[in-house]
Image: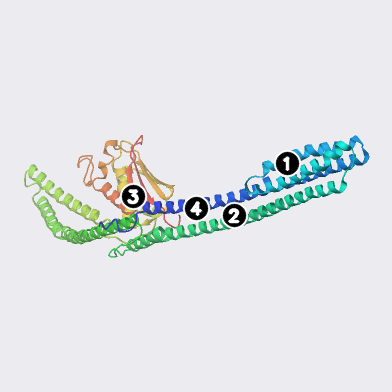
Amino acid sequence: MDERTGPGWPLQRWYLAVVVVMVLVVAAAVGMGAGALHSLNAARSLVVDQADPASRQALALANALVDEETGVRGYVLTGRQDFLQPYQDGQQQEAKAVAALRALQTGDLTSAGAALDAVQQAANQWRAEYAEPALKRAEAGDIERGKALFDQVRGALSDQESQLSAARTTGRAALATAADNLVVVGVSVAAALLALIVLLALLAHFGVVRPVSKLAGEVRLVADGQFQRKVSVGGPREIASLGADVDLMRLHIVDELDTLKQVHDELARSNRDLEQFAYVASHDLQEPLRKVASFCQLLERRYKGQLDERADQYIGFAVDGAKRMQILINDLLAFSRVGRLTREKVLVNCDDVVAQAIANLDTMIEETGAQIEAGPLPSVRGEPALLAAVFQNLLGNAVKFHGEDPPKVTLSASRDDDVWTFTCADNGIGIEPEYADRVFVIFQRLHPKDAYPGTGIGLAMCRKIIEYHGGRIWLDTDAERGTVFRFTLPVVEEEQ
């Protein structure tokens, strides 16, 4: 089995299982609810649509028969024709009521049909044996016999009313039972849904949330530096796979750390070798150069004029070469020390640093008649000696590479969010845009060494110092005249 897949269910299977459970629970709830509603509707239909209308029609039938009996009795006693009207209207009402009762006596009221038959039979017997003969003879006839026959009608009506009342009572009881069942079903469905929600919450907690939280905790421990701690989690297959991938990443990090440690050790050895080289360059290499320069100068003083002009020229070349070699070695040593021999960074007042740089360039400024305007400059955090070297290099280049007019240099600073942007602009000979990157390369010169003095390391030194202080330096190629250098330094935390 692949370690990254794990033995657990995948999230897709968990999802399908949850969906199936939800569908089954909802289907069961819908079925139970539909059954309860059907029972409630059947009971309501029995009471509202059958039992109650049948009772009303039974009452109408009873009233119609009573009207018939009243009309017959009034006619035979008085002989007045207007008493026949209730009898005739009663017969019509009786027919309508009987028809309505026949239509309603279906389903649970089918048994009430026998009672209606008994009512009709008793009514027909009363009419045949008493009412119709009495109406034909226009006399009361056997009143007791007629009363006895109509009492049978009343008895049949009473039996019918009893059956309808019993049916109505049964229907109301069924309606109440169906309503109670609906409430029970509703409560049961709500309880089932609540249980399902709790179950889903537990599944989500133990199946997803808990494994993810455990994985997050394991990853956090690794992120805190416990790289030797193995990342292992359970749960769904995807989370287990993710944990295995994280553990593989941890192993890669451990391998990279081991590699970086080896590289760091090699770099430390290389730095020690570089320091040894710097020591040799500053002592052992310069000592022969000083001897060469000293003896060449002795030759020049002792034999000047005694040799031919070419010999004097050769001696001058040798002295100059030795001196330039000393300058190159000193500049290279200074370049190599930037960022390697670090000192504590302090709050530096740039106005004071620029004033010191101008003082160091006093002789050059006096010879060229240069004007230097340094506006209010901010305080930054850094090493004063290194920042002074930056300003001295930029100002020195501005004065050195001047045109026909006396040099005029402007030094200013402006704030842009969390950095200060310094600008050093002059009216000199300028630099072509295609050399904007080349001027910052060590020992790269744009002019012959006999045209302008220097070793070509100054701007490379400036870039290294500025980057060491967290900024950047560049040549502004959009300047219309002269040369414009810009560099940035972070705003100190107190000002932020």
- Nearer mark to the viewer, of 2 and 1: 1
Category of crowding for the residue at label 2, using alpha-carbon neighbours closer than 10 angstroms: few (below 14), some (14–19), many (at least 20): many
Residue at (61%, 51%) from the top-left corner? 40
Describe the element under mark 2 as helix, strand or loop: helix
Q: Counting other residues with Cα less than 10 Å from the Cα at mark 1, is it few (<14), some (14-19), or many (20 or more)?
A: many
Q: Mark 3 points at which residue?
A: 391
In the rendered image, which residue does mark 1 sit on?
A: 98
In the rendered structure, which amino acid carries the disc numbered 3? Phe
Element type at mark 1: helix
Q: Where is residue 436 in the image (x, y as percent from the top left)?
A: 28, 40
Q: Distance between the residues labelled 2 and 1?
A: 36 Å
Tell me where residue 468 appears, x and y as whole percent: 31, 54
- For residue 423, what is the image quadrant? top left
> Mark 3 to mark 4: distance in Å?
86 Å
Q: Quick check: can you spot residue 60?
A: no
Residue carrying label 2: 182
| Residue 290 spot, x, y in % from top left | 14, 56
Q: Earlier in the sequence, mark 1 or mark 3?
A: 1
Marks 1,3: beta carbons within 8 A: no
**In 3D space, how far apart are the residues under numbered discs 4 and 2 (Cα atoms)?**
14 Å
> At numbered mark 4, what does the secondary structure look like: helix, strand or loop?
helix
Q: Nearer the viewer, mark 3 or mark 4?
A: 4
Q: Where is residue 470 in the image (x, y as percent from the top left)?
A: 34, 52
Nearer to us of marks 1 and 4 is 1
Q: Distance between the residues labelled 1 and 3?
A: 122 Å
